[in-house]
Image: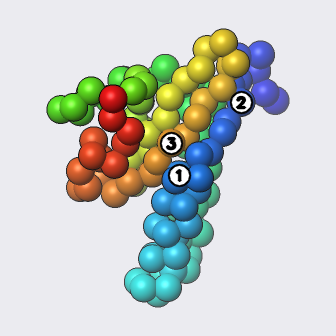
Amino acid sequence: MASEKTYRLEYLPGAQQDLVEIVRYISRTLLNRQAAEALAEHFFFTAERVGENPYVAAVYYPIKPLSRDYRMVMVDTNCMFYWVDELEKKVTIARVLYARRNSGSLLDTR
């Protein structure tokens, strides 16, 4: 049952592409379809949890300032970056990146 405080989720095209590439890599390159499916489920479960409580994750502060206050939550070895629009009660998932990547350079900068 959805609570009154649940935020609407929106996935930017970059995040959608990130998810497809991560799952495809695990499934096709690593030949582990079960792990790929489990990770995909974990991504969407985590996103739903973020929609229920978007302020659970701290604001992400890279070296260079960003145009928005991104928050980051870990999903296995990946970082899910999002921002919260309080007026629209919306959480926007911007990117999903491998944790060892230089995330700050892949998010929009001012």
Q: In this view, does 88 lie to the left or right of 29?
A: right
The CA distance from mark 3 to mark 2 is 14 Å
Under tag 2, what secondary structure?
Answer: strand
Q: Can residue 75 be seen in this view?
A: no
Which structural element holds mark 1? helix
Q: Earlier in the sequence, mark 1 or mark 3?
A: 1
Assign the C terminus to one quadrant of the image.
top left
Amino acid type assigned to the residue bearing label 1 in the image:
Ala
Q: Can you give x and y, in whole percent of width and height, for residue 50 in the image?
A: 56, 32
Disc 3 marks which amino acid? Ala
Give the spatial CA distance, label 1 vs label 2: 16 Å
Look at the numbered discs 1 and 3 and tell me whether their residues touch, using CB distance below 8 Å. yes
When the figure is inspected, residue 70 is found, relative to residue 3, above or below; the finding is below
**Identity, as a three-letter code, of the amino acid under mark 2:** Arg
Q: Is mark 1 in CB contact (under 8 Å) with mark 2?
A: no
Q: Mark 3 points at which residue?
A: 94
Label 3 crowding class (10 Å Cα cut-off): few <14, some 14-19, many 20+? Answer: many
Q: Which residue is drawn at 45% across and 76% down?
A: 26
Picture coordinates of residue 28, whole percent (x, y): 49, 85
Q: How crowded is mark 2: few (under 14 residues within 10 Å), some or many (20 or more)?
A: some
Please state which of residues 76 and 110 is positioned toward the viewer in this rendering. 110
Quarter of image, res 107: top left
Marked residue nearer the N-terminal end (3 or 2): 2
Please, which residue is most extreme toward the left here? 63
At x 59% / y 53%, what residue is drawn?
13
Look at mark 2 in the image and give the residue it sits on.
Answer: 8
Q: On the image, numbered disc 1 is attached to which residue?
A: 15
First reached walking from the N terminus: tag 1 or tag 2: 2
Q: Which residue is drawn at 38% across and 54% down?
A: 97
Q: How far apart are marks 1 and 3 (CA)?
A: 5 Å
